[in-house]
Image (spheres, rainbow, N blue to C red):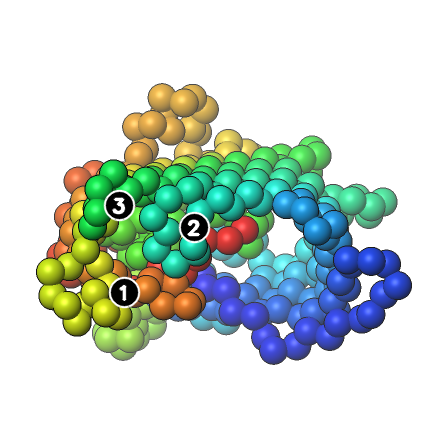
Amino acid sequence: HTRTVCPYSTPINLTLRNTDTFLSQSQVSCSKRLSSFDETARGVSVTATGGGPATLAYELVFREINDPTRLASKAIRHQLGHSLKSSVAYSWVVDTRDRVTRPTCGALYRFRSELSGIGLDSQMTKFFKQEIEAQTVHTPTDGVTLSMSAKLGFLKPLGERDVKKGTCVADRFFLGGVGSLRGFDTHGVGPSDERRHPKDLEAANASGILARDQLGGDVMASLFLSAQLEPSWKKLREIGAYAHAFVNAGTLVPFPSGDTSYNSKINTIKDITNSARLSVGVGLVFPLPVGNVEVNYVRVARAGGTDRTKNGLQIGLATALAF
């Protein structure tokens, strides 16, 4: 699925210093080519910042997951219905890079911890979610910049009910696509489940509806290594474009739970390592204020059996990764 935020966000002024409160409604819309569900979320969020690298936020959200396609897989149908999320999140960011767009030196570190289930309602969604992102950049010689970035994510259900049911698909990690794991379709990596067959199979194939729902994962890791080179063509240099050669690796697996339609029984570090995906490639990068447009030629060296790979030319927007 893809996330889009509706243009409805009303700030409320408070007397507390460095504190922002927002009444918000967000829509997680369905992309029929990726997964068969819509998620609608309505609620309130409060964010407090102290002027330093740390941020503390509270969110109370009523969420509803529907199946507008009537074709959802068993694993997605198991997720349908309402849920209440009451969570507190702590974020810490340190950025020593010389610039945000195509840095040449420095490092970036981001940490985010979220605890959901704050309150007395036993039906609240309960989980702990940890996300870590790091990037380091070095320029050994003029015209050559080496960059390494990594992301780690872990989502664990809490409480007897949530451990038995498994995590909510709206809270899971997704992997695949330019800016995530190159050489794979957007959200094309990891656990999936077969959808119900449409009545008009030819029309479904013509519209690009896939046969499987992407389910996301609870344990995610990705690594991106690149060598960035100044192009010889002057016009490309003038617009800030550069060439790069890269290696991209990642893995996405579920947390073992009582949900057998989603549980792949991955219990050890060795199993997680064996599920790693790998791609290599070269391309041109065109920096923009909202991210980088990449035109890459990619070859997938390792993939899962149900992954949607994209060998050859791949074009996409790699936005800044934020939690």
| Residue beneath the point at 74% across and 67% down | 22
Q: Is residue 52 above or below residue 253?
A: below
How far from the left and from the top, in percent, is residue 57?
72, 51
Marks 2 and 3, the one that precedes in the sequence: 2
How many numbered marks are there?
3
- Label 2 neighbourhood size at 10 Å, few (<14), some (14-19), many (20+)? few
Marks 1 and 3, the one that precedes in the sequence: 3
Residue 240: assigned label: 1
Residue 167 appears in view: no
Q: Nearer the viewer, mark 2 or mark 3?
A: 2
Residue 85 appears in view: yes
How far from the left and from the top, in percent, is residue 85?
70, 53
Amino acid type of the residue tagged 3 in the rendering: Thr
How far from the left and from the top, in percent, is residue 53?
63, 45
Residue 287 occupies quadrant: bottom left
Residue wearing tag 2: 98
What separation in Å lies between label 2 and label 3 (alpha carbons)? Answer: 13 Å
Marks 1 and 2, the one that precedes in the sequence: 2
| Residue beneath the point at 63% across and 59% down | 81
Q: Secondary structure at mark 2?
A: loop
Q: Is residue 71 above or below residue 220?
A: below
Amino acid type of the residue tagged 2 in the rendering: Asp
Q: Secondary structure at mark 3?
A: strand
Q: Secondary structure at mark 1?
A: loop
Residue wearing tag 3: 145
Q: Is residue 207 above or below residue 297?
A: below
Q: Viewer-proximal residue, 134 or 126?
A: 134
Q: Viewer-proximal residue, 39 or 233?
A: 233
How far from the left and from the top, in percent, is residue 43?
73, 64
Q: Is residue 297 above or below residue 161?
A: below
What separation in Å lies between label 1 and label 3 (alpha carbons)? Answer: 14 Å
